[in-house]
Amino acid sequence: MPMTLAEKILARAAGRDSVKAGEFVVADVDLALVHDIFAARVFDTLRKVGFDKVWDPDKVAVVIDHMVPAPTAEAADVHHRIREHVKRLGIGTFYDSGEGICHQLLPEQGHVRPGMLIVGTDSHTTTYGALAAAGTGIGTSEMVYAMATGRLWFRVPETLRYEFSGALQRGVSWKDVILHLAGTFGSDGAQYRSMEFGGPGVATADVSSRLTVSNMALEMGAKFGLFAADEITAEYLGEADTSWAPDPGAAYEAVHQIDLSTLPPQVALPHDVGNVTAVSDAAGIVIHQAFIGSCTNGRIEDLRAAAAVLAGHKVAPGVRLVVAPASRSVLLKAIEEGVAETLVQAGASILAPGCGPCFGGHGGLLGPGERCIGTHNRNFIGRMGSAEAEIYLASPETVAASAIAGTITDPREIQR
Amino acid sequence: MSENMIRGRVWRFGDDISTDLLSPGQFALDPLEVRMRHVLESINPSFAQDVKPGDVVVAGANFGCGSSRETAAENLKALGVACVAAGSLSRIFMRNAIAVGLPILICPGIGDAFAEGDPIEIDLAAGTATNTATGTTCTGEALPEEMRRILAAGGILEVLRLDGGTRPG
């Protein structure tokens, strides 16, 4: 029976020839990710329920990324406890404070391969769908179960297929594409579904772009956000496995056609990721902070795109530009290429690689009445500090252009 | 009263109640006693103080959207919320609620059937919610057996204790 990509991966992980949407399966987990908000809690609980070890230390990744460098003594203590757990349990993959964001490091450092089933205590674990891996977020109790047994229950999701044609206009990026989808179908438009991205247009999306799209599939409620493995995936991974693709004739709940060439730059307005409009419709809204970073858009490609807009310009008076590279290697590349210099010359503050501002922990929070436009993935009330602040989401190009103007601005209007 | 029946008083919320509202990031590392005092404070500052054990949260679509943070479900349970009944639930929140033993009901349109403070009767096995003041019944989805089994055990860690990790969960 023909299967969608989600069905194929879950069938393989469940040791079955085939599965279909709606079934419950118990599947083996290929990789389990925990980060510093939840790692200590997971490992403490694991011990409390009587397990002194994880099922397979080589299939566990621990990343300290949300509170780096530790902003409080309490956070530093949590990090200390995590390091002790990692040592005690013999965990194979550990990225300590300052290495970067989990969803950047795992693909970047080669831990993600097509066909894998990956669970993480972070909702944006859907990011790995960019490399044809079924990644999805779970809570801490479920992670304890997975750490103890290597297994977890899954409901095989229905799949929504998105077929792209054409190519993006200059100044428009794949961040605009996923914002457009959230705006068109709503922030629950893919609730508990697998999103499958395909069609001839995906050949124009590099892995960085795909990581952005799969990352924000979660913002439409998706369980997975999958691209098939193709030549672009193979080149990124340095291997030729392009076998992880949906079967012809697979059953979809719906198939949507999107012509990339018609899309202008997009922005999500407060306080819903699905509250999306063209940047030109929001032009002129005054901003106080611009943020470039996060697991959505903190890669070197994003920093380059922002620097290309910012080069030769200064950030508007009264605007803070905060940049958080997604990993140490991204920061190093930005330094080597002169991208970091361009950003700092324009007025940026560069933070240590990590998640701080995006999840509202530290490193650029907002006061009452302030507005921030950022490249991150969420604009919920209270997300970045004050509940009376407003968050707008856009591409690195749009955020850079807005930082220069001091108001929300279409990047195509900024002249070099 | 069977374990499938819940009777309580309604706290009414709209669409897209996020995990940032249910478990604000600034308190992510705080102990449960602190976290539970900040539940929904950005949109209803009196909720965490005035909610009573047995009360029911009724909401619109996409309840629990956002982060993996299980604390969103755990905080509600700690406040004594007996059930979350919503038009739709985010996938991660739904899994987390089951994992911590917080009953849930998905009932499209339920937001329109209740006002703040209304008496509610929920039958989890039948998947219904009745407004006992108006007599209106909203029929939703009965939970699949796999989910009810975990709920009945008191959460997935209880299942793990029972299984000892030796049997599939």
Image: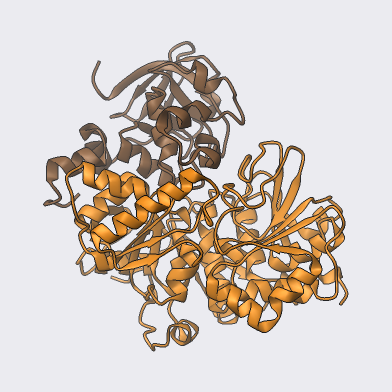
Chain colours: A orange, B brown
Percent of width and height locating residue A94: 37, 65
Q: Residue at x 45, y 61 (%)?
A: A126
The percent position of residue A204, horizontal first and vertical second, equals: 60, 81
Quarter of the view holding residue A177: bottom right
Residue B18 visible in the shown view:
no
Q: Position of residue A241 (x, y in %)?
A: 36, 85
A245 or A82, which lies in front? A82
The residue lying toward the viewer, choosing from A72 and B9, is A72
Horizontal and vertical percent position of residue A390? 71, 44
Q: Nearer the viewer, residue B144 or A328?
A: A328
Quarter-wise, where is residue B18 in the image? top right
Q: How many marks?
A: 0
Against A70, residue A74 (above or below) is: above
Q: Residue at x 86, y 61 (%)?
A: A405
Quadrant including the C terminus of chain A: bottom right
Residue appearing at x 79%, y 64% in the figure? A347
Q: Nearer the viewer, residue A44 or A223?
A: A44
Quadrant where the N terminus of chain A is found in the figure: bottom left
Is residue A363 visible to us here? yes
Horizontal side of residue A181 vs A70, given as left or right: right
Image side of residue A80 versus residue A127, left or right:
left
B36 lies left or right of A409: left
